[in-house]
Amino acid sequence: MQAFRLKEQLVPILTQTLVVGAILYVALLLFQNTQANLEARNIASGFGFLSVESGMPINDSLLAYAPADTYGRAFLVGIVNTLFVSALSIVLATALGVLVGVARVSANWLVARLAAVYVELFRNIPLLLTLFFCYSTLLAFLPAPRQSLSPLAGVFINNRGVFAPRPHWLDGMGWVVLALGLAAIGAVLLARRSKRLRDETGRGLPAGWISLGLIAGLPTLAYFLAGRPIDFDVPTLHGFNFKGGMVLRPEFTALLTGLVLYTAAFIGENVRSGIQSVDKGQLDAAKALGLRPGSIMRKVILPQTLRVCIPATTNDYTSLVKNSSLAVAIGYPDMVSIGGTIIGQNDQAIEVIGLWMAVYLTINLVLSLGMNWCNAKVRLVER
């Protein structure tokens, strides 16, 4: 009997040990084969190339960059560009997705049908085609630099991008930033005070309007008292293009537009399913209290919708980050595009691919942790 029990305990352990050993053996064979192939082609392995001068130009860069900088700096520029477009796309796609989801369950037949057409259109077209469409549309309908559109003074729109004045901080701008920080702190304290009063008396303060006045008014007052400490570098036409100012290029605009339109269709469906999951008794109770339709949606339906939407929307956010790698197809210098150029110049494919995998894995794990934290905050706690 004891021998039988010992056998039952040893067999699973031995099986798992053999499986792990086989996996490690295959990994060792792949590593040795890779090293042999690299040596046969006289390709040095390692990450030493990151400290070598790149010599590559990058048009769109949120960081200071010049071709004399290293490959490591160039790759960092790509990471920052990827993070920026992904974060901005998540915010805009969420806002558009909520609007689409609410429109999908609207009592207005036309609004509901238009939202349904939007969802079915973008969910069933590959994102790459959407990016190509957005990019080609921008280039086809925007004029040349000499015929630029100028809707505002100092702003020029053409097929090279949107050129606008670049602000420069002068002495005294710190007071404006300090005033903005104090206004934000005041708004938070006011919101807490309003919530406390509402819990105690049933009536709160108009915290939204007062906070808006604080955040807009206090920095504006500090701006004028400090002598308007901002100067602007206005773009001017030189030859066939504009010089100076800041520019929003068509590649970035097309990528942002495509990611937002595509992802918002999926988020809209998440919101729709979340709204339809709210019990009808909740709506009847809200109507019996005399709440208006807009208040019912904001205060009753959407808060409960979050419990259903967040898990599915987490997948859409992580997919958006990964889909941003399609920027290489329209020429936006994201991490994949810059890494591809590095591979072409140095043949360090394995190292660069490993960096891609590590960065995307880190971004999505951090994003998932944040969304899981939000999900834990809004879910119902069973007693």
Image (cartoon, grey):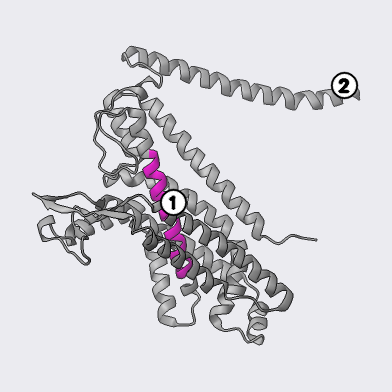
**Of residues 97 and 197, the one drawn nearer to the viewer in this rendering:** 197
Give the percent coordinates (x, y) of residue 287.
63, 85
Indicate which label's residue lies in the foreground, 2 or 1: 1
Query: In the figure, 321 relative to 221: above or below?
Result: above
Q: Does the magenta stretch include residue 81?
A: yes
Mark 2 or mark 1: whose residue is earlier in sequence = 2
Q: Which mark is on residue 3?
A: 2
Residue 103, image x and y in percent? 46, 74
**Residue 19 x %, y %:** 63, 25
> In which quadrant is the N terminus drawn?
top right
For the magenta stretch, what is the residue range? 79-100
* Label 2 packing within 10 angstroms: few (<14), some (14-19), many (20+): few
Image quarter where the C terminus lies is bottom right
In front of the other: 110 or 209: 209
* Callout 2 amino acid: Ala
Q: Residue at x 56, y 47 (%)?
A: 368
